[in-house]
Image (cartoon, rainbow, N blue to C red):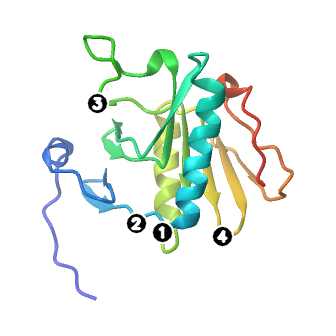
């Protein structure tokens, strides 16, 4: 396969481009389109956003956002789920949630899609952790397991249906298992 070299974009140029569906991310000067989510991915994503928000949003502790563009550290990424502590949710001059999130999430959750590069996803997770994210999950629906990346970049794997998955300190009331 021959690839034609493309001129690297700047982050500012990337952010001026129209949004794509599925979303594109800006990583190392390149625009990389995410794969289209499929059934298992969408099911897990929807259930997790709902479960997290049911516990954390009501008490203004944090809020989970699906497919939210986050621009920080020279990258612009779209985690499958980005969770922000309530006080860190960007707001506009009227106190409403801003359209632009120029900060790293407090917790990211990525759900591996078929044919998606696990290496690219892990690189995004590590970029988030290097820029203040407290914890990241990488869920593999096909293997039915969850990789948990802690802020110090240690890694733990949870694969039994009854395994309680660790959450960031602010989300201590969220109790989720692999099953």
Q: Is residue 14 left or right of residue 47?
A: left
Q: Are marks 3 and 4 in contact (CB under 8 Å)?
A: no
Residue 160 location, quadrant:
bottom right
> Residue beneath label 1, please?
116
Earlier in the chain: of badge 4 and badge 1, it is 1
Q: Determine crowd level at label 2: few under 14, some 14-19, many 20+ residues with C-alpha closer than 10 A.
A: some
Label 3 to label 4: alpha-carbon separation: 33 Å
Q: Quadrant of the C terminus?
A: bottom right
Label 3 to label 1: alpha-carbon separation: 27 Å
> Residue beneath label 3, please?
99
Label 4 to label 2: alpha-carbon separation: 16 Å
Kindly identify which numbered label has been placed on residue 138: none
Element at label 2: loop
Of the pair 29 and 21, the residue shown nearer to us: 21
Q: Determine crowd level at label 1: few under 14, some 14-19, many 20+ residues with C-alpha closer than 10 A.
A: few
Q: Are marks 4 and 1 in contact (CB under 8 Å)?
A: no
The residue lying at 50 percent from left, 30 percent from top is 132
Kindly identify which numbered label has been placed on residue 142: 4
Q: Determine crowd level at label 3: few under 14, some 14-19, many 20+ residues with C-alpha closer than 10 A.
A: few
> Residue beneath label 2, please?
35
Nearest-to-viewer mark from 4 and 1: 4
Label 4 to label 1: alpha-carbon separation: 12 Å
Q: Are marks 1 and 2 in contact (CB under 8 Å)?
A: yes
Earlier in the chain: of badge 1 and badge 2, it is 2
């Amino acid at each position: 396969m021959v690839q034609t070299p493309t001129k690297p974009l700047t982050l500012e140029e990337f952010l001026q481009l129209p949004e794509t569906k599925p979303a594109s991310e800006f990583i190392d000067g390149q625009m990389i389109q995410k794969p289209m989510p499929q059934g298992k991915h969408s099911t897990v994503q929807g259930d997790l956003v709902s479960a997290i928000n049911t516990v954390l949003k009501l008490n203004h502790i944090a809020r989970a956002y699906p497919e939210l563009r986050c621009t920080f550290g020279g990258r612009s990424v779209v985690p499958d789920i980005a969770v922000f502590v309530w006080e860190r949710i960007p707001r506009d001059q009227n106190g409403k949630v801003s359209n632009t999130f120029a900060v790293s999430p407090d917790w990211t959750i990525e759900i591996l899609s078929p044919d998606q590069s696990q290496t690219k996803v892990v690189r995004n997770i590590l970029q988030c952790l290097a820029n203040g994210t407290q914890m990241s999950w990488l869920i593999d629906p096909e293997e039915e397991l969850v990789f948990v990346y802690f802020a110090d970049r240690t890694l733990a794997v949870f694969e039994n249906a009854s395994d309680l998955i660790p959450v960031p300190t602010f989300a201590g009331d969220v109790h989720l298992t692999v099953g």
